[in-house]
């Protein structure tokens, strides 16, 4: 009789432990959205009146590896307005993954910032997220006088788009995390 009772108790404990192990724990970790890998950034500038497009390009196929990235600046015409289109790729994947699509789909969580050191170069956003805030995948770049300088392009993830100046492209109060930041040499002729 005692053996039968022990078997019932042990069987009951085994069943309870199996059921308990199948139950989802409340404290299971939440797996965050992984950062995208960006190996390539192209900023294609096409003169609005027609002409040859200029491509500012950054490529770093080994990421943080030992090889330096390839950065190609460009020569722009003075007194010209260009239509700008940014493209982000992960070329570690085959075929290359177009990260631009993800940034566009998550537009409320991303914003490009443009910081020209060249005087008389201005950039304006031409695309907006669902909330009416800028993204920066498309833009216009306008040159005036001849000069040289740089253009820094930064993509921020989860910037504070409502912070002062952010909607006009001021990165100072943007916060968030930098997904990619590249500085190109510019020569306005």
Image (cartoon, rainbow, N blue to C red):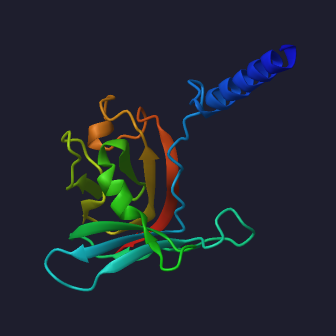
Rendered position, 100 above or below 175: below
Rendered position, 177 above or below 136: above
Q: Is residue 172 left or right of residue 30?
A: left
Q: Residue 73, position in %: x, y?
A: 46, 73
Q: Is residue 15 left or right of residue 141?
A: right
Q: Residue 45, position in %: x, y?
A: 30, 73
Q: Residue at x 51, y 47 (%)?
A: 178
Rendered position, 12 above or below 101: above
Q: Residue at x 54, y 35 (%)?
A: 30
Q: Residue furthest bottom?
A: 52
Q: Residue 166, position in %: x, y?
A: 32, 37
Quadrant where the C terminus sits is bottom left
Is residue 119 shown to the viewer in this render? no
Is residue 55 shown to the viewer in this render? yes
Q: Residue at x 52, y 63 (%)?
A: 38
Q: Residue 41, position in %: x, y?
A: 45, 68
């Amino acid at each position: 009789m005692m053996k039968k009772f022990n078997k019932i108790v042990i069987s009951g404990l085994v069943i309870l432990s199996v059921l308990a192990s199948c139950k989802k724990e409340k404290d299971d970790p939440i797996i965050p959205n992984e950062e995208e890998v960006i190996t390539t950034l192209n900023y294609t500038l096409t003169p609005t009146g027609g002409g040859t497009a200029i491509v500012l390009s950054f490529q770093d196929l080994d990421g943080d590896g030992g090889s330096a990235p390839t950065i190609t600046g460009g020569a722009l015409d003075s007194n010209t307005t260009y239509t700008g289109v940014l493209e982000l790729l992960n070329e570690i994947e085959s075929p290359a993954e177009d990260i631009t699509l993800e940034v566009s789909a998550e537009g409320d969580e991303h914003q490009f910032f443009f910081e020209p050191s060249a005087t008389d170069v201005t950039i304006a956003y031409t695309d907006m997220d669902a909330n009416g805030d800028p993204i920066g995948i498309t833009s216009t770049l306008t040159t005036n006088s001849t000069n040289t300088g740089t253009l820094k392009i930064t993509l921020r993830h989860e910037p504070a788009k409502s912070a002062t100046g952010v909607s006009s492209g001021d990165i100072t109060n943007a916060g968030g995390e930098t997904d990619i930041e590249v500085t190109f040499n510019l020569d306005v002729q």
